[in-house]
Amino acid sequence: MHIVMLAGECVPYAKVGGLADVLGSLPHELEALGYSVSLIIPRYRSIDLARFGFEPLVGFSSKTFDVHRAILPGSNAQVFLIGNDAFFGRRGIYTDPVTGWDFPDQADRWIFFQRSAMEFVAAVLPQVDILHCNDHQTGLVPAYHQRFYRGHSTLARTGTVFTIHNMGYQGVFPADTMARTGFNTAEFFPLSPFEFYGMLNFMKVGVVFSDAVTTVSETYALEIQQSAEFGYGLEGVVRSRMEPPIGILNGIDYATWNPANDPLLPARYSQDDLEGKRKNKQAVLREFGLDESRIDRPLLAMISRIDVQKGVDLLIGVLPGLLSQDVTFVMLGAGNKEIESQIETILSGYPRKAALKLGYDDRLAHLIEAGADIFLMPSKYEPCGLNQMYSMRYGTVPVVRATGGLSDTVQEFDPNTGRGTGFRFGPYDPLHFRNAINRALRYWGDPRSWRRIISNGMESDFSWARSARRYVELYESVRSRYEA
Ligand code: ADP
C-alpha cells in the first residue's frame, strides 16, 4: 500500500508545531508495518537542500514549480519538495516573521501548493492508495482529487484521509478566492462544502470531501463536535458527517526524546537512576541566569508557543501568587509580543528565581524537560499536545488542564492506589489552575509519592507504534471501499 502524506511542515525540514513531528515520525512506523510512504511539503527557503541530500527530480518538469527529492532520514520514505520562489522563497512558514501575521497571499500560496502537489502526484507517483491530508493547508486536496483526478489511472482507487491537528486555524479566505482555486465558482453558494459565512474555508472542504476524518486525540474528536469553543464554527459540519471523526493520539519520537541517550543533555539518566536529572536542573538554572543554590527548590517550567490557545492568560493570573512562594520558574517560548512582554514584566520582579527565554530552541527544550520538576500546560484547548508526553518520559510531572489530548494522556495522581502521572484541572480559571499546582507542590514535598508519580510517567507508553497501527486500520478500511 502506498500512502501519500501532504502537509505544510515536516521534521526535520520545517517545523512550527506538533504537526511537523507527526509527519516526521509516522512514516517510520508505517514502513515498519509494510507500507510505503511519500511525503510532500513546500520547498521553504529555510530548508538546507544540501544538508538533507535533496536533489532536483529528473524527468519531471513543470512551468510553474520544481520538485526536489530526498529520503527521510532513517527510513525509505521519499520526501518531495514543491518549489516556487515567489510563494515559498521567503522567510517564514505560515506567518511573516517581521510582522508576526499571516502572509497576505496566504490563500494563493496554499492553493498553489495543493494544485502543484496534485499535478506532481498524478504525473510521477505510482498507484496511490491513500492521500493523507493534514490541516487546512491541504484541505482542498480531497476536493481536487474528487473533482479532477478520479479518472486518472493511479488515483482512480485512492481514498482520502483528512487529519485535523488544530481546529483553531481553518484557512478562511474572502469569497473571491474561490475563482483562483480552479473549482467551478458555481459550487460556492450558501451552505455548500466550500462556503462558510460568506467565506471560503479550506478546513471545511477537507472535512466534507474526505473519506475519513481523524483528529489527534479521542477527547478532541468529541470536543470539536460539541461547541464553537472547540469547533470554531465547524462543529455542525463535523457532526453532520456520516462517520464521526476518529481520535488517534499522536505518539512521540522515542529516538529523539529519550533521557537515557539524549545527546542534547549535559547528563543522561533513567528511571532507575535520576541523579542525572539533578545535573540537568543545575544546568537549567545556570542557563537562565538564576540562583543556582535554588537546586533544592521545585523548578516549574513551561515550553510553549505564546498564544491564547496555550492558556497564557491563566499563567499570567497565577504567576504573581506562585512566585511569592519558594519556587523557581522558567519559560521558553515565543509568539504574541504583547503577552511576551506581560510575562516579562511579572518575572522581572523575581530575577533570581524566574526567567523567560524568548525564541525557539530545540536543545534548550530538551534540557528544560530533563531538568524541571513540574511542567505546566494550562491550555484552553489542546488537540493532542506533545510536551506533556515528553515531560512524563523525562520524569517531569505535568500539571495540565483536562482538555483534548491532555485529558487522554495525563491521569490525576491518586495516593490511595499509587496510580496517576500528574495533576489536572477542569474549569478554565486561575483558581483551579493554582489548586492543581498546589497539589503538585504538596506531593513534591513527599519524596516517596513523588518518586512514584515520576515512575508512573516514565513507564507510560507514548510510542508511535500504537498510533500507527490505528492509522493502518483506518487506511485499510478506507482503501477497501475502492477495491475493484
Ligand atoms: P503546538 O503544536 O500546538 O505548538 P504541541 O505540544 O503539540 O503544541 O507541540 C509543540 C512542539 O513544539 C513540541 O515539540 C515543543 O517542544 C515544541 N516547542 C514549542 N515552543 C518551543 C520553543 N520555544 N522552543 C523549542 N521547542 C518548542
Image (spheres, grey):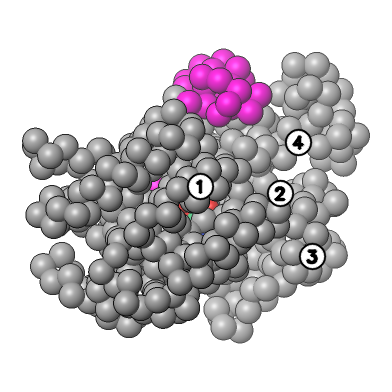
Q: For the residues carrying marks 4 and 1, which lies nearer the camera in this image?
A: 1
Give the mark nearest the N terminus, 2 or 4.
Answer: 2
Q: For the residues carrying marks 1 and 3, which lies nearer the camera in this image?
A: 1
Give the mark nearest the N terminus, 2 or 3.
Answer: 3
Tell me what residue is drawn at x 55 percent, y 78 percent: 52
Give the mark nearest the N terminus, 3 or 4.
Answer: 3
User: How many C-alpha atoms fall within 10 Å of the one at disc 1: few (<14), some, or many (≥20)?
Assistant: many
Report the amino acid beneath label 4: Val
Is 460 on the left or on the right of 41, as rendered? left
Dots 3, 4 in contact, CB < 8 A:
no
Name the foreground residue: 11 vs 331: 331
Report the amino acid beneath label 3: Val
| Distance (Cα) linking label 4 and label 1 | 30 Å
Tell me what residue is drawn at x 37 percent, y 34 percent: 425
Disc 2 element: helix
Tell me what residue is drawn at x 80 percent, y 46 percent: 107
Which residue corresponds to mark 2?
114
Residue 4 appearing in the image: no
Q: Provide the residue span drawn in magenta.
A: 223-251
Q: For the residues carrying marks 2 and 3, which lies nearer the camera in this image?
A: 3
Give the mark nearest the N terminus, 2 or 1.
Answer: 2
Residue 350 x/y as whole percent: 50, 65
| Distance (Cα) linking label 2 and label 1 | 38 Å
User: How many C-alpha atoms fall within 10 Å of the one at disc 4: few (<14), some, or many (≥20)?
Assistant: some
Residue 388 x/y as whole percent: 37, 51
| Distance (Cα) linking label 2 and label 3 | 26 Å
Which residue corresponds to mark 3?
98
The numbered dot on residue 172 is: 4
Which residue corresponds to mark 1?
315
Q: Cβ(mark 1) to ligand 1 < 8 Å? A: no
Is 310 on the left or on the right of 66, as rendered? left
User: How many C-alpha atoms fall within 10 Å of the one at disc 2: few (<14), some, or many (≥20)?
Assistant: many
